[in-house]
Amino acid sequence: MNQFSAMVEQVAPVLRANAAVCDEESAFPVASMAALRDSGLMGLLVPREYGGLGGDLAAFVEVSQKLSAQCLSTGQIWAMHCFQVDAIARHGTSELAATVLPAVAAGRCYIASVTSERGRKADLFSAASPLRADGDSLLIERSAPVVTGGAHADGYLITMRAAEAAAESEVSFIYADRADLVCEVTSGWNALGMRATDSIGMELKGRVPTTNLVGGPGGFGDVARQSMVPLSHLGWSACWLGAARGAFEGLTRFAAKRGADSRTDLFYERLGRVRIDLELLSAYLRRVREEVELARVDGTPLDHPRIRLQLNTLKIAAAELSFQAAHRMMQIAGLRAGYLKDSELGIERLFRDLRSAALNHADDTMTVGVGALSLLDRGVTLI
């Protein structure tokens, strides 16, 4: 067992114990996140020079899976926090890194993402609300319909139009400490699944120093392509796989207890189909992760059409295969063990949670992107 697996083992009982009640109450997993803060895992991607664990993408994918096997909402909250940490570590100013990263490593700073915007299509690379300069400070006034864990965050990374005179495609990425903001919750979160993510609507207003810009003025596009997009697709896919894998482990143990008399050819066929879904997703996730790691080591831009194709394909495949696995597991478990909310297997919650995967950065839109990118890779360079 490696260092990171051992750390996950310490917090896993807390996540497992709180998963069902946080889902039922649509409540942020406060106890689970407190355990993660205390464990040091919030600083997994913080470089060691700032007191972090200095983990790589392999560790990030592994921990995302293992946490999500206990509670998918908590796993995804943690993974999204890591997206923000990586952006600051790789693209933040030295002043920002020196201030924020040690606090993250110590478990004092959980960072939420503010990229959604009211009245705007789901386009990550555009923003309407402008940053306004005031001497050595930047003024933030931002409304967002969805901020995962926003009410509990210690800091925020926010996309905004670079300036009042800038085009909406000129997007800046700005870090704001909660202490520098006036935060108002504008809408709640009562969803079918992923209920414990507490993805509320918020309004944020405040003033931050110009050194809080990540990637420089108008530099969000590069930060997103080199850091946030790769980590989001790897992280979400790992979380979905981990949740489905954890449920499958529970299902196989449950089936083994029932004895061989209940196992028909149909049972084995359905079980085999789930295993195939998970094997395919696991293999593709590993290969894309290796490609991204290699590109980072070599300094290859991650906006190359081939890599973008692979990342988008990973996200779509992960959403489809993980939910397909959940659907098949419910068929195997049946009405009482699979469909009922109080079943020990938790497949009903998994089914609801994974239904959101295809809606999170909609697969339909991403598939259009895969088609367009395919015309730029006419040699069909497969992974």
Image: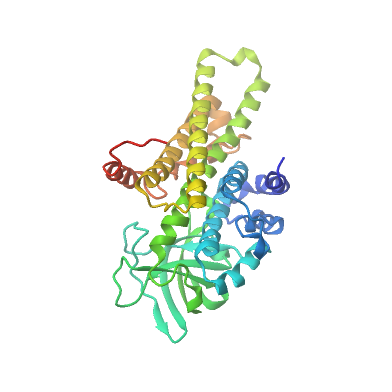
Furthest-front residue in this view:
298
Give the quarter of the image for residue 131: bottom left
Q: Residue at x 63, y 64 (%)?
A: 104
Depth check, front residue: 343 or 178: 178
Q: Which residue is drawn at 35% across and 76% down?
A: 163
Left or right of 7: which side holds 365? left
Depth check, front residue: 333 or 274: 274
Q: Position of residue 363 (x, y in %)?
A: 36, 44
Q: Which colour scheme is used?
A: rainbow
Depth check, front residue: 242 or 73: 242
Give the quarter of the image for residue 167: bottom left
The answer to whether residue 116 is visible is no
Q: Where is residue 346 in the image (x, y as percent from the top left)?
A: 59, 37
Quadrant showing the N terminus? top right
Furthest-bottom residue in this view:
135
Using the image, determine if residue 247 lies above or below residue 12.
Answer: above
Q: Which residue is drawn at 61% across and 72% down?
A: 99
How many marks are shown on the rendered structure?
0
Q: Position of residue 369 (x, y in %)?
A: 31, 46
Q: Position of residue 285 (x, y in %)?
A: 50, 39
Give the quarter of the image for residue 70: top right
The answer to whether residue 56 is visible is yes
Q: Residue at x 62, y 12 (%)?
A: 261
Quadrant showing the C terminus? top left
